[in-house]
Image (tube, grey):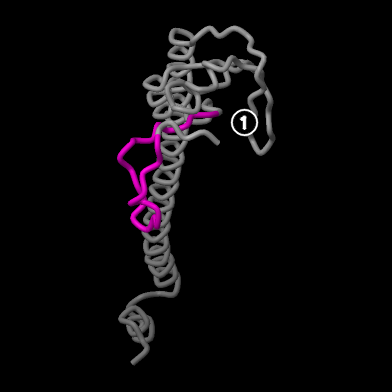
Amino acid sequence: MGNSLQDQFLKMGLVDKKKYNTSKKKLHDKRTKAVKDDDIAAMAKKAMDEKKKQVQQHNKKKAAQREAKEATARARQLIETHKITQEEGTTPYNFKENNTVKKIYLSKKTIDRLALGKIGIVKLAGEYQYVPADIIYKIKELNKNLIVLFNTPATKNTQREDDPYAEFKVPDDLMW
């Protein structure tokens, strides 16, 4: 059963050994070449797909970097155009920046505005700048790393639900 038609023709003497070997070799070459061509085409397609994917990832990364750079530039422009010039004060004001406590001297008016959330502190080119609250919100959307200090303004009607002293009003003229 294992004999092919060619083997049977060779045994019967209808085909000589030389023709048998050449036809067998041609058949074998034809089969392997077809397989090799398919493998090569598949490998080439796979390599092209991988290269395309790498290029797309690289382009996305570059686009993200470019967008971040543009956002930072817009935030810096906002700071430059809306910064509040403040004179040096005599009252020390401490705040936290990157896990270190910084001290600057401000006027009492500026400290009150910072505490109420009317202005915030941003760091631009190694210097602290004071910016209004509405600009701080815009900067926060663009690049929140530039914001050093911003106290969100508290609404007067916000009370905790579990506050045991909520029913007792604090008089406005209370002196400590």
Magenta-drawn stretch, dominant element (helix, strand or loop): loop
111 or 18: nearer the viewer: 111
Work out whether 123 lies above or below 61.
above
**Is residue 168 on the magenta stretch?**
yes
Query: Residue at the location (50% across, 22% down)?
Result: 112
- Measured as percent of width and height from the top left, residue 103 is found at 68, 25
- Measured as percent of width and height from the top left, residue 49 is found at 39, 45
**Residue linked to disc 1:** 95
**Is residue 1 on the magenta stretch?**
no
Q: Quadrant of the N terminus?
A: bottom left
Quadrant of res 18: bottom left
Give, as a single range, the part of the protein colored magenta.
149-171
- Measured as percent of width and height from the top left, residue 67 is found at 42, 25
16 or 68: nearer the viewer: 68
Query: Residue at the location (46% across, 21% down)?
Result: 119
Query: Residue at the location (59% across, 14% down)?
Result: 107
55 or 155: nearer the viewer: 155
Query: Residue at the location (41% across, 22% down)?
Result: 133
Quadrant of res 55: top left
